[in-house]
Image (cartoon, rainbow, N blue to C red):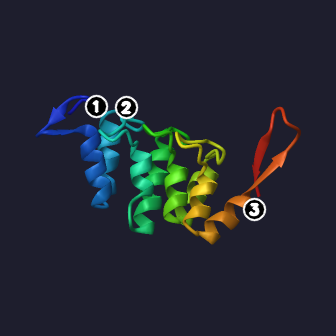
Amino acid sequence: MPKASGKSNGQTATEILLEAMSKDKVHLARFVLDALDGEIVDSRTESAQTPLISSVLLPDGRTRCKFAELLLQRGASVNRQDGTGRTALSYACEKGYLDAVKVLVRNNADPEIVDSWGNTALMYAAVEGHSPVVEFLVRAFKRLGGTQGDHYVVL
């Protein structure tokens, strides 16, 4: 059994997980996560992306949501940032993947996290012209309270 930092056949456990996701092999992904007791669920690739970020970038909507849900169920940090301060929500918004945005919002993704360039997830959706994502985020998050202790409620 490979360790999170060790290699098996030239691949790290994280690389095996990412390959399983890219090939829609959910059973292999579950096996890797189970074998390592979830140790790699928040690991980072060489480009500092987490498996959750990689999952929301998958091109097929069904596959994208299936792996995002699996990783979140296994304890992935929904708001974990990559090397540039971007989150899975930021990438999903930029791509216009409303299905992934909904999964992340249901799991308490924070829409106000700012990346290294000062951008939020909503800004990425707006700049890329993804109106359905912008409309969903605006409807989904409603501020409650004053300037201290702000909270969000998913509507």
Name the residue beneath numbered marker 2: 39
Name the residue beneath numbered marker 3: 139
Name the residue beneath numbered marker 1: 4
The amino acid type, in three-letter code, at marker 1 is Ala
First in residue order: circle 1 vs circle 3: 1
Q: CA distance from mark 3 to mark 2?
A: 35 Å
State the residue at coordinates (25%, 29%): 5
Q: Is residue 140 visible?
A: yes
First in residue order: circle 1 vs circle 2: 1
Q: From the viewer's side, name the closer residue of 95 and 123.
A: 123
Q: From the viewer's side, name the closer residue of 96 and 120.
A: 120
Q: Secondary structure at mark 1?
A: loop
Q: Position of residue 73 (x, y in %)?
A: 50, 45
State the residue at coordinates (34%, 56%): 26
Estimate how packed mark 3 is, as few (under 14), some (14 to 19) or many (20 or more) residues with alpha carbons within 10 Å. Answer: few
Q: CA distance from mark 1 to mark 2?
A: 7 Å
Q: Position of residue 95 (x, y in %)?
A: 48, 63
